[in-house]
Amino acid sequence: MTVMGMATDTQFHVLAVDDSLIDRKLIERLLKTSSYQVTTVDSGIKALEFLGLQDDERNDPNSPSLSPDHHQEIEVNLIITDYCMPGMTGYDLLKKIKTSSSLRDIPVVIMSSENVPSRINRCLEEGAEEFFLKPVQLADVNRLKPHLLKRKTRDESHVQTPSPLQQQKQQQQQQQQQPTIPSTTTTATTVK
C-alpha cells in the first residue's frame, strides 16, 4: 500500500476539497484506487493556503497574492472540490483559481449532491472541467484522466517553445553573460 502514497513521474497529484469527512475519505479512496496521489483539505481557504494563494483580507481585500513564505513542494495537477462548503464555496474557490495567473491552468472539477442545472452551468462557464454529482463513482474518476493529460501536453509544449517575450529575455541574459570585447573599428577598402 505504501507504493500508492509515493509520487512517481507518471503519477498525477489531485487536491481534493470537501468539508464532509465521509465524502473526503470516499473521494480519496477512489482517487488512490486509480493511482492518483491525493492531498485532502476540508475548506476552500485551506486549499488556497496549500496552493500558496493567500487571500489576506486584512492587508489587501482586493487581490489574492502568492504567499512568499509558502513554497509548494508538490505540483497539483487537478483540483476536485465540493460545491457547498461553509465560508468559501467550491464556486468561489473555482473563481479564485481561474483568476490567478499561476493557478488558472490547473483543471478544476466541482462535485455536489444537488442536481441544480443553473449551478452546474455557472461552474462550467466559469472554467470547471467537469461537474460530478455525489456520490462520486469510479466511472467519474476515470473521466479525470483526459483533463490531466491535456494539461500535461500543454505544459510540455510551453516548456519546448518559449514565448517571444521569454526568448527576448533569454537573449538579453546571454548577451549580458558574454564577456565584452572592446570593439575596434576597421575599415576595409577594396581596390579594383
Image: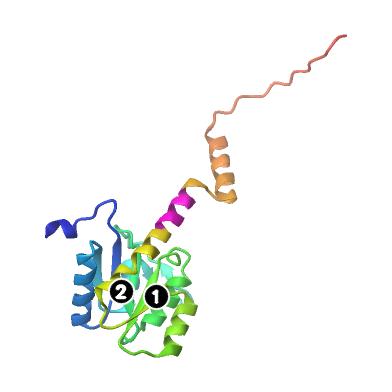
Residue count near mark 1 (Cα–Cα under 10 Å), binned few <14, some 14–19, many ≥20: some
Name the quadrant containing residue 114. bottom left
Residue 130 image label: 1
Residue 45 lies in quadrant: bottom left
Where residue 51 appears, x then y in whole percent?
A: 34, 66
What's the CA distance linking mark 2 and mark 1?
9 Å
* Residue 61 at x, y percent in the picture: 46, 79
The residue tagged 2 is: 140
Q: Residue at x 38, y 59 (%)?
A: 149
What kind of colouring is applied to the model shown? rainbow
Q: Nearer the viewer, residue 178 or 58?
A: 178
Front position in the image: 175 or 152: 152
For this orientation, the residue located farthest to the right is 192
Image quarter (top left, top right, bottom left or bottom right) of the C terminus = top right
Magenta residues, dominant SS class: helix
| Magenta stretch in the rendered image | 152-159
Query: Along the horizontal axis of the image, is 40 left or right of 71?
Result: left
Image position, residue 72 (x, y; %): 32, 60
Going from N to C along the chain, the mark reached first, 2 or 1, is: 1
Q: Is residue 183 above or below residue 135?
A: above
How many marks can you see? 2
Give, as a three-letter code, the residue at label 1. Glu
Q: Secondary structure under badge 1?
A: strand
> Which image quadrant for residue 145?
bottom left
Residues at badges 2 and 1 in contact (C-beta under 8 Å)? Answer: yes
Q: Magenta stretch: residue 99 in it?
A: no
Q: Which mark is residue 145?
A: none
Where residue 77 appears, x then y in whole percent? Answer: 35, 62
Q: Residue at the location (43% across, 55% down)? A: 153
